[in-house]
Image (spheres, helix red, strand yellow):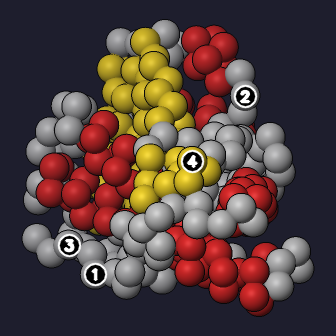
Amino acid sequence: MTTPLSTRPGPMHRLLDPAIRTILDRLDIQPHHAVLEIGAGGGEITARLAQLVGRYGLVTAVDTDTSRLIPTTVIDVQRRDLDREILPGTTDAYDHIIARWTTGPLRDPVDVLEQMIARLRPGGWLILADIAPTTPKVYRAPDADDDPLITAVMNRARHTLSGGDDASTWTGDIETLLVNRGMTQHCIHLGTETWIGNRPGCRLFADIVTHLRPQLLTQFSDDELGRFAALMADPRVLLTSYTHRLIHARKND
């Protein structure tokens, strides 16, 4: 079995990968299982899922951009726009469904959730991950003007990612929605980390801002974005990460 080849993963997906890897270790994913992955990105989680399900399993990897995903005998790559197209699969088609989304609220998140729940087999787990609408906190910066600059850039970057100040991919009252649709066993985790300049977390922040640079130039100058990049490489900087939200829910037997 071969694993998908991909270029460097996009920075927004990398925000959620560590939390998803942690939850994968807790799921009972067996050889021969069928798993639906939504928001596959560059295929890093896809490759891990393919290892878990083995040569007789199936991983259906879905994203709006599938250019970095390569299908194999185990990995079925499907391009889908969740705002306009139906998810692949039929009723009770998958043992587990994992979805990460970093590009803002869906047009009809309830419909997408209902599609996922319908495709999930009884006893299977639904894993949802997104970025919560919170702002990183700056604990330490070299100069007095750096704190407000870091905060402003990260606020604007999150706004650009999420599509709004309070936007959330999977809806606000997701607990009630899950319970009403037969997902009575569920848990929601919110997590943040403290990051230091020139270490992986701050370098990820710098990558995100570089990725969003064309949009951010409407609010900030080249010098300001250059200063932000320099601060993310400065070990005197100490700040918190964005808050990731991880929801896992089990469908009733």
x, y percentage for residue 49?
25, 53
Q: For mark 1, what is the residue?
A: 5
Image marks 1 and 3: residues in contact by CB distance under 8 Å: yes
Query: Disc 2 to disc 3, how far (Cα)?
Result: 36 Å
Q: Residues within 10 Å of mark 3 (few under 14, many from 20)?
A: many
Residue plotted at (47% across, 73% down): 234
- Answer left or right for 243 relative to 153: left
Q: Residues within 10 Å of mark 4 (few under 14, many from 20)?
A: few
Query: Disc 2 to disc 1, how far (Cα)?
Result: 35 Å
**What residue type is disc 2 on?**
Gly
Q: For mark 2, what is the residue?
A: 172
Q: Is residue 17 above or below residue 186?
A: below
**What residue type is disc 3 on?**
Thr
Q: Using the image, tell me which numbered label, if any, was put on residue 139.
A: 4
Image marks 2 and 3: residues in contact by CB distance under 8 Å: no
Q: Quadrant of residue 142?
A: bottom right
Question: What SS does tag 4 mark?
Answer: strand
Q: Nearer the viewer, residue 98 or 157?
A: 157
Residue plotted at (56% across, 54% down): 140
Q: For mark 3, what is the residue?
A: 3
